Image (spheres, helix red, strand yellow):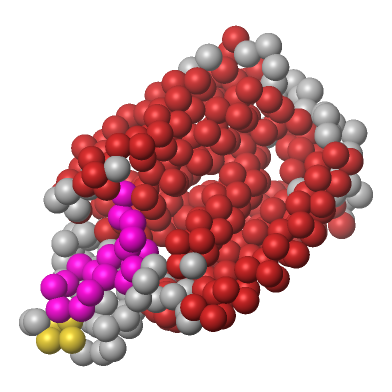
Amino acid sequence: MEIFWYIVLMTMLTIYVILDGYDFGAGIIHLFFAKTEKDKKAITSAIGPFWDANEVWLIAVGGILFFAFPTLYASAFSGFYLPLIMILWLLIFRAIGLELRGQIKNKMWETIWDKAFGVSSLLLALFFGIALGNIVRGVNLGMVTDGISAYEPHYFFLPLWNSTFDPHSEHLGVIDWFTLMLGVVGVVSLMIHGANWIIFKTNSALNTKLKNVVFSMNFVLLALVLTSLATWHIIEPKPFHNFIEHPWLWIFPLITFSGIFGLFKVKTFKKDGLGFLFSSMFLFGGLTSTVVSIFPKVLPSTNSVNPSLTIYNVAAHEYGLTVGVYWFVIAAILVAIYMFVQYRIFKGKMDDVGYGEH
């Protein structure tokens, strides 16, 4: 049952990254490229009916983590307390930026909440990329110092950074040069994803410019991905061992690079939705490639004293996991119906939605 719930957890996380990812990306586009009120209206109209529903997937991920893998939940939510609190506040500021902007027709008021929306979106994309970097790099489980574990084997706590900025330091921080690099990958990839969503859902005059942005930033994304792959062995001596032992797993990197190379044709696409499809492929392939590379680990240990957390040593009791399947099926059916109705109602272009207007 551990593998079943792991697949459920990763599926929900992937759905969240793809759906709320275009929200974050649209916010980044709003921050840097929306110069006129008409452009800003097009962006908020494209995401307005969806953003709050998309964030529910993050709550669902937390719920599944608490139910199926309680030890990982306890370990991660205490160890990553500082960045999680920052993410929570950024999600709040991003939401109120969208909601409060249109409450008062005043230039200064609108500018403040525009910046709150855009900057929060940018930092959220950065922090989620950094979070992925921390999962790949691992943490000092048990807070081992000089070969002695100071706490329980699954406990850790990370400051935001340390003075060395080194991913091999005995006392790690959330941010080091490796996790920051993956954070930048997150920003660039979600900006491309958000631009593709805006192109897909609007007829904005901004769309031609956004196609050029996607094309240009895709070179940056490809360079970042290749650099991260080249430096991965510094963090993990055998980063591709799972792919060598199970060759069928290469399908996920193949999807990743198919998404990247497909985006180089964004200027020639006849259908606006193709760009969004290819950026979704990149996000899906990139995330799944990362998690299967460390499987069955879910949080590697950087010391030799305490073992890594795996899906087997952090899972709940077999009975609870089995009973939970029945409730999951009911919830999955309800969510599927809701998502179908929502995207059915708001299919097509969204220029006239008028989200957040006075």
Q: Is residue 186 left or right of residue 196?
A: left
Residue 34 image point, x, y percent = 67, 34
Query: Is residue 299 covered in magenta?
Result: yes
Q: Is residue 111 left or right of residue 353?
A: left
Q: Residue at x 27, y 83 (%)?
A: 153
Placement of 320 over or under 58, stated as above or below: below
As rendered, which of 340 and 118 lies closer to the eye?
Answer: 340
Query: Is residue 298 covered in magenta?
Result: yes
Q: Is residue 95 left or right of residue 275?
A: right
Number of labelled discs? 0
**Residue 77 seen from this side:** no
Q: Residue at x 70, y 62 (%)?
A: 329
Kindly indicate the quadrant of the structure image that contains residue 313: bottom left
SS assignment for the magenta stretch, majority? loop
Q: Residue at x 55, y 59 (%)?
A: 8
Q: Is residue 27 left or right of residue 2?
A: right
Residue at the farthest left position: 146
Q: Residue at x 87, y 56 (%)?
A: 104
**Residue 71 seen from this side:** yes
Residue 288 image point, x, y percent = 44, 46
Placement of 104 over or under 263, stated as above or below: below
As rendered, which of 9 and 126 lies closer to the eye?
Answer: 9
Kindly indicate the quadrant of the structure image that contains residue 164: bottom left
As rendered, which of 224 and 97 lies closer to the eye?
Answer: 224
Magenta stretch in the rendered image: 293-310
Kindly indicate the quadrant of the structure image that contains residue 175: bottom left
Residue 202 image point, x, y percent = 77, 28
Residue 319 image point, x, y percent = 54, 81
